[in-house]
Image: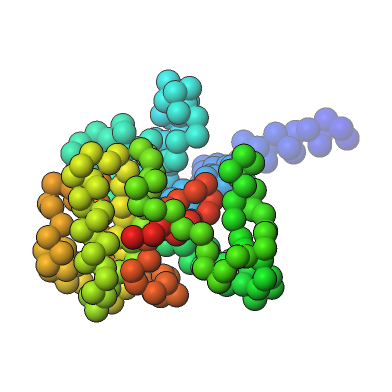
């Protein structure tokens, strides 16, 4: 009886149609390609606006020397550094710039909301950052104005943001002060966010009217950006310096 059972099984195996075997193979293949590893890869690549092929190339690059040299470098930068053509390098550069612009705008908007919340909850105390620990502390506020750093106190490598619009007359004075400082050798950069402009042409016209040197823009010591409404809570001209995860006002 056992021999008969084995014979039946063998017969079934031999008589299995070729297309059935193909279907079984396809099902096994499909199961492998939709496993948790690939789903995780798809999720990660989507967060960086990369397709699956780009993400695989990023992983391959990070398995090599780049992973040792720059273990924390983000995928867009890794792909841009190892671009295989000028057009590819330009594309990744534009992606990196756009992500950075969004990051700065979001951080500034949250900083504004944080400061407003502090004023509501602790109106009699001034918000400042501890220079030794970087932590946020509160102290009795001597006045209603927050402590602002003078532009002359900026250091090499600092990053500033200027929130401006075309109706702001004081913005011209701030731009002139910034341009003069950079022309005199200051080694920091300024990202200008314009609140009321919808096109790049309007931005160029504004920059021309402000007499912003083209060389400073080309060298990215000054960048020109259209705000998408994220920074509408700031009244122009607002000049701020990045201090870790916080932004501190700069007097002008």
The reply to whether residue 42 is visible in this rendering is no
In the visual, does 165 lie left or right of 118? left
Where residue 74 appears, x then y in whole percent? 44, 40
Which quarter of the rendering shows the N terminus? top right
In the visual, does 88 lie left or right of 8? left
Where residue 25 appears, x then y in whole percent? 55, 42
Residue for point 20% across, 50% down: 180
Where residue 159 appears, x then y in whole percent? 38, 48
Which quarter of the rendering shows the C terminus? bottom left
How is this picture coloured? rainbow
Q: Where is residue 211, by image quadrant?
A: bottom left
The one of 195 and 16 positioned closer to us in this rendering: 195
Where residue 243 appears, x then y in whole percent? 49, 48
Above/below status of 13 relative to 30: above
The one of 157 and 9 positioned closer to us in this rendering: 157
The reply to whether residue 222 is visible in this rendering is yes
Looking at the image, the residue that sits furthest to the front is 142
Looking at the image, the residue that sits furthest to the right is 1
Number of callouts in the render?
Answer: 0
Residue for point 23% across, 74% down: 169
Residue for point 31% across, 52% down: 190
Above/below status of 84 relative to 179: above
Residue for point 24% across, 56% down: 177
């Amino acid at each position: 009886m056992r021999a008969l059972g084995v014979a039946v099984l063998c017969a079934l195996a031999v008589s299995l149609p070729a297309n059935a075997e193909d279907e079984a193979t396809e099902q096994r293949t499909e199961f492998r390609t939709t496993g948790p590893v690939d789903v995780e890869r798809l999720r990660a690549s989507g967060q960086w606006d990369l397709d699956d092929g780009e993400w695989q190339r990023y992983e391959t690059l990070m398995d090599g020397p780049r992973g040792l040299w720059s273990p924390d470098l983000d995928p867009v930068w890794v792909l841009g550094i190892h671009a295989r053509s000028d057009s590819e390098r330009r594309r990744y550069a534009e992606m990196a710039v756009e992500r950075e612009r969004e990051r700065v705008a979001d951080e500034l908007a949250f900083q504004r909301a944080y400061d407003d919340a502090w004023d509501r909850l602790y109106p009699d105390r001034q918000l400042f950052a501890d220079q030794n620990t970087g932590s946020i502390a509160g102290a009795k506020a001597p006045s209603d104005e927050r402590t602002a750093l003078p532009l002359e106190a900026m250091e090499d490598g600092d990053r500033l943001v200027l929130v401006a619009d075309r109706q702001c007359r004081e913005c011209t004075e701030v731009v002139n002060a910034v341009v003069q400082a950079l022309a005199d050798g200051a080694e920091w950069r300024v990202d200008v966010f314009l609140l009321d402009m919808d096109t790049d042409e309007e931005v160029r016209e504004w920059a021309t009217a402000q007499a912003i040197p083209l060389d400073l823009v080309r060298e990215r010591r000054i960048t020109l950006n259209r705000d998408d409404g994220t920074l509408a809570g700031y009244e122009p001209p607002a000049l701020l310096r990045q201090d870790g995860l916080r932004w501190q006002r700069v007097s002008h």
